[in-house]
Amino acid sequence: MEIGLALAQYGRFASLDSVRHVAREAESLGFASLWVGDRLMTPLAPKDRYPGGDGTIPEAHRVFLDPIAVLSVAAAVTTRVRLGSSVLNACWYPPVLLARSLATVDQLSGGRLRAGLGLGWSSDEYAAVGVPWRSRGSRLDAVLDVLHAVWTADPVAYEDDRWAITPSHIFPKPAGRLPVYLSGFTPAALERVGRRADGWLPAALPIPVLTSMWDTIRESARRAGRDPDEIRVALRCNPIVTEEPAPDARVPRTGTVAQIAGYLSAVKAAGVHEVFVDLQLTARDDDHLLELAQAFLAAL
């Protein structure tokens, strides 16, 4: 099982120095991958609950650097470590522009990108970017169709009731085949992963729940005529690290490095191929984040 780390991107880590420092040091320590997320704003009275903790948006999310910009900086200061998004809220972006941005990062990184896409959870953010909240699932399917067309065809042509691409040359293309990972936990989202994704991006959930969802994805892949063993799983964990052991019921959301690493080691049995930790909600500064990161790498 491979071990990754969330890049410096938000809260006290939202700075060029932090992005550069954490990216370089994480590669030097031996992490396999670096990941970014995607947040736009923190509503004062949100219509939807944050899908974690007590449902309150973390205060650190008030400052959130653009994920494509952060990936570009990381690509420039590293040479080996893979880069990924978990996740870009795909429906926010005109898909032709999204295709260009992701292909550019893949080219600049020498083919190290994995495009992790999802639907997001905030209807307030959809309203802010002028995208309908309803029918977002079908919109994501159309985004995936456009990405595939732009990345693989020349000339490119596409038309539906949202977008029209007249036959055109559209470059750059990705450096190679750019893997697309999808997030989601609903039956429709899991079915979509099995039907058309290269990987699944779950969060840290009870292992029986993960196992059940993974079984759903594998069955969907079989129905679509795909080999389920070709789909990878990369799990995100956003822990609050404590010095004293936490009650078992609170792990892996909270606990010591050993407790959280124990959970992350156990998820391999649920079909997880890779885990990555986001330490920005618990670390005091860059050095503390990297100290915790090294402790997780050693424990795992």
Image (spheres, grey):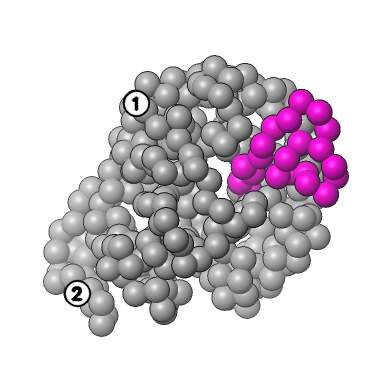
Disc 2: which residue: 164
Residue 155 placed where, x, y %? Answer: 19, 64
Q: Is residue 239 magenta?
A: yes
Residue 265 placed where, x, y %? Answer: 77, 39
Task: Kindly give the residue lying farthest to the bottom in the view shown.
Answer: 161
Instruction: State the separation of the CA atoms marked 2 and 1.
Output: 37 Å
Task: Please state which of the two labelled residues, at mark 2 or mark 1, is closer to the viewer.
Answer: 1
Q: Is residue 213 left or right of residue 21?
A: right
Q: Residues within 10 Å of mark 1 (few under 14, many from 20)?
A: some
Q: Is residue 32 left or right of residue 249?
A: left
Q: Quadrant of the N terminus?
A: top right
Residue 238 placed where, x, y %? Answer: 62, 42
Dot 2 amino acid type: Ala
Question: SS class of the residue under badge 1?
Answer: helix
The stretch of residues the image draws in magenta is: 235-255
Depth check: give the residue in front, 192 or 89. Answer: 89
Q: Quadrant of the C terminus?
A: top right
User: Do the CB atoms of the residues marked 2 and 1 lie less than 8 Å apart?
Assistant: no
Residue drawn at (31%, 38%) of the image: 69
Question: SS class of the residue under badge 2?
Answer: strand
Dot 1 amino acid type: Leu
Depth check: give the residue in front, 295 or 226. Answer: 295
Whether residue 144 is visible here, answered yes or no, is no
Residue 138 placed where, x, y %? Answer: 42, 77
Picture quarter containing residue 188? bottom right
Residue drawn at (19%, 74%) of the image: 164
Question: Which of the marked residues, 2 or 1, is nearer the chain's N terminus?
Answer: 1
Task: Give the numbered dot on residue 16.
Answer: 1
Q: Residues within 10 Å of mark 2 (few under 14, many from 20)?
A: few
